[in-house]
Image: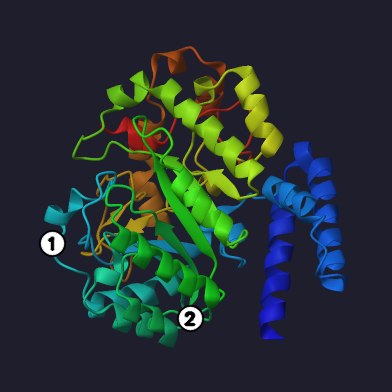
Amino acid sequence: MKKRTKIFKSEFYRIRELLSFPKYRFQIIVSIVCIFSVRVIKFLFPVLRCFDNLYFRHKQKLLLDRSIQINKSSRTHKEILRVATTYQCNVNCSFCYAQCLREEFKRHMSLDDFEFLVKWAKSQGWKSFRLLGGEPTFHPYFKDILDIARRERLTISISTNGLFDREVNTLLNRDLIESINFSYPQTQRTPEKKDLFCANIKNAISKGIPVVGSWIIYFDDEDGWREIVDLAKRYQNKITLRFSMALPGKREDLSPADLKQNLRKIVKQILNISSYCYQNRVLFFFYRPLLLCMFNKSELDFLYSISPFLFDSQCACFYVDGNYANLVTINPDLTCYPCPVVQVKGMKIASNTTREDISQYFKSSVTELSRKPLVDSCANSDAFNNYKDQLKNKFRNFFDKKICQGGCIGYKMY
């Protein structure tokens, strides 16, 4: 009964969020009705498969709020605190934007600091932690971290490379773990690692834990992404896929200039990914803001035909209600970043620190970064100018096709 109440509550929050977009309200209502109708039919006649395609198409159209839709909870960005308990890792992925932080943060977060952070976060309205890294399961006291969260009635979601020891699976259960984001081992695709990765995903699915599969888009890897799509196909929509462009990071292995020169190659991949996922009924979305000017009109029309919410052109996390602490990330030493990929070091969290303190600390630096044009076309773009105008106000229409942030702020730092 408790589980059903939680699912009903999550559906209510998700529908309420979807209906807040007047422009798409009719389309959303049609999709909701179709999904509900197919669910009833499949419940009454479980062997029927003829409605699966209809169900998928409308479920894909409603894939909106990442923290609600994927975690299947009532969590919003405001309620999830990102915490990097360690920046150490058991692998060396070339695409990892946090790899350069291993030297800066050599020590893991202590258990005392984690327990303090849990109590402080709850006092500030956070109800769930997203464990980042590094590799969260690589922390020597990972079990104790989960025990503290459980004792304090704090739920956990995890971003992992999926290559943790199988014994870790015994620590993961649906009551505590809201979701797990598995980042596919793109640069180390040995049979042994693939087997371990798949086994850990299978275990999470078997326990009813929502699973997200993550793939980083590189301009020089044209069709490697098919591996993770084919993996998701095997599990019949029990994995939602998240695609995002590679970030430069402090190591500067990928420079913003490389990104600019290869935008059309990235666009080609995005279109191919979208077509392949849609044809194979695999739920997917693009994470982090994309530039509208990357695409021509026919390309945009194709992407929006799949879903008006398939990608964002502005970051939904920084400017919700004018607050710049919605995506704040806590480092192992209790200092913070405004976002995992915007590595502008902020204050150290103390017992008297408030959300508003953090928001005000980052407001000017984040705003200034976001106003920088990433590519030459941004300077004279109406969509980018509309975005800068919106910075003066509190806004929520993140899917306005006439507003563009000019790409993830993480691209603009280097």
Q: Position of residue 45 (x, y in %)?
A: 86, 70
**Element type at mark 2:** loop
Mark 2 residue crowding within 10 angstroms, few (<14) / some (14–19) / many (20+): some
Q: Earlier in the sequence, mark 2 or mark 1?
A: 1
**Residue 173: which numbered mark, if any?**
2
Front-most of residues 379 and 354: 379
322, above or below 377, in the image: below
The reply to whether residue 225 is in sight is yes
Which residue lies at the image location 41% right of the left edge and 70% below the top edge? 200
Quadrant in the picture for residue 107: bottom left
Residue type at mark 2 is Asn
Q: Quadrant of the N terminus?
A: bottom right
- Residue furthest out toward the top: 380
Quadrant in the picture for residue 103: bottom left
Residue type at mark 1 is Lys
Quadrant in the picture for residue 12: bottom right
Q: Position of residue 401 (x, y in %)?
A: 63, 28
The reply to whether residue 127 is in sight is no
| Side of 33 relative to 166 (left or right) | right
**Element type at mark 1:** loop
Q: What residue did someone put label 1 on?
A: 106
